[in-house]
Amino acid sequence: MSGMDDEVEIELEDLAGIGSSTADKLRRAGISSVKELVAMPVKELLERSELGEGKAEEATKSARDLVLPKVVTARDFLERRNMPKLTTGTKNIDGLMDGGLEPGITELIGAYGSGKTQLCLQLCVTVQFTKNRGGLNGAAFYIDTEDTFKSERLLQIAKRFGFEDDQLLDRVYSFRAINSDHQFEGLRQAVEYTKKSVRLLVVDSITSHFRNEYPSRENLVLRQQRLNSFVHGLQRLVTLYDLIVVVTNQVLDVPEMIPGVRPARPVGGNMVAHGSTFRLWLERTKGKTRVTCIDSPKHARGMTYVMLTEGGVEDAEEED
């Protein structure tokens, strides 16, 4: 939802109150674009750069004033968000999401084997489709925290969609995050690639490292703080680059069987729930996967069915 024309390259020196000396300090801190400066909280900017508090506040305000619109009407907002959607490669899920995925964070929740990773890999293929096929003619960046990213699987899925060679692999960038600190580094790397051609960012899974590194209740507050920081980093990318972000999330068994309540709940609690724009729950049932839209600001609650095949995630008949 950027208010800045992507065709016009604006340098840091073009900002009000930012001279060459301040711009050099920003670049030494790893901030090379106005959009990056917009996304940077003053506290973080102070930690990363040589700027004083007054200059840091001035720099971020100048960037926001240039890039972000102050007040817009609902009509303006609708027109600016009226952009192509990304097909999931299945008519059933596309129908559930009114045509496909759109800018925002889509959370895929499910147990092991429910098809979360398979759908993520399939999206890495469909994002490369031309727009008249439901794609975005863009690249994908995949932050892999569980060693589930497989190029061979991408080729199997691509074959189903008519890709005859392996050139599509050159437009899927994989980052293997080995711990939560490294996962943040993956997010910083994703920013650099998003400036170029990436239109889809996948995090598979978003909670795994945080869950493993902060296991006890006494570490819960710190875990949620760090997880919240990561989610906010994703939200900034969505806002500044109209990026489609897809994250997978694990589930926890719920020992108390309460009538009408699922016997499992997503990991991450309210931090992930509130940070996600759209939430899809994937459940294996009778050889198929039931996909339920459990939360969305614009879609009706509904469900559909898909199946996992050699060619990826395909439509399945709905149960009677």
Image (tube, rainbow, N blue to C red):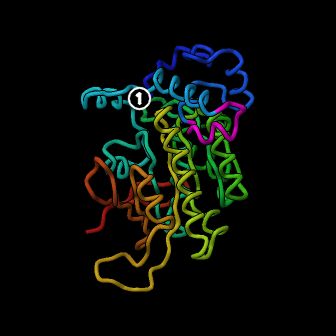
Residue 114 lies, with reference to residue 197, above or below; the image says below
Residue 45 lies, with reference to residue 230, above or below; the image says above
Measured as percent of width and height from the top left, residue 26 is found at 68, 27
Question: Horizontal placement of 220 versus 75: left or right?
Answer: right
- Given residues 171 and 21, the one toward you in this image is 21
Q: Which residues are magenta?
A: 40-52
Measured as percent of width and height from the top left, residue 296 is found at 33, 52
Disc 1 residue type (three-letter)? Asn
Please check the rendered image and state whether residue 45 is part of the magenta-colored stretch, yes or no. Answer: yes
Residue 160 lies, with reference to residue 273, above or below; the image says above
Measured as percent of width and height from the top left, residue 258 is found at 33, 83
Q: Residue at x 58, y 13 (%)?
A: 14
Q: Residue at x 36, y 47 (%)?
A: 94
Residue farthest to the bottom, as pictured: 256
- Given residues 99 and 301, the one toward you in this image is 301
Kindly state the secondary structure of the residue where label 1 is placed: helix
Judge whether residue 36 can be spotted in this image. no
Number of residues whose C-alpha sits closer than 10 Å to that of mark 1, classed few (under 14), some (14–19) or many (20 or more): few
Please check the rendered image and state whether residue 2 is part of the magenta-colored stretch, yes or no. Answer: no
Judge whether residue 175 can be spotted in this image. yes
Q: How many marks?
A: 1
The quarter of the picture where the N terminus appears is: top left
The quarter of the picture where the C terminus appears is: bottom left
Q: Residue at x 63, y 52 (%)?
A: 153
Measured as percent of width and height from the top left, residue 40 is found at 57, 36
The residue to which callout 1 is attached is 132
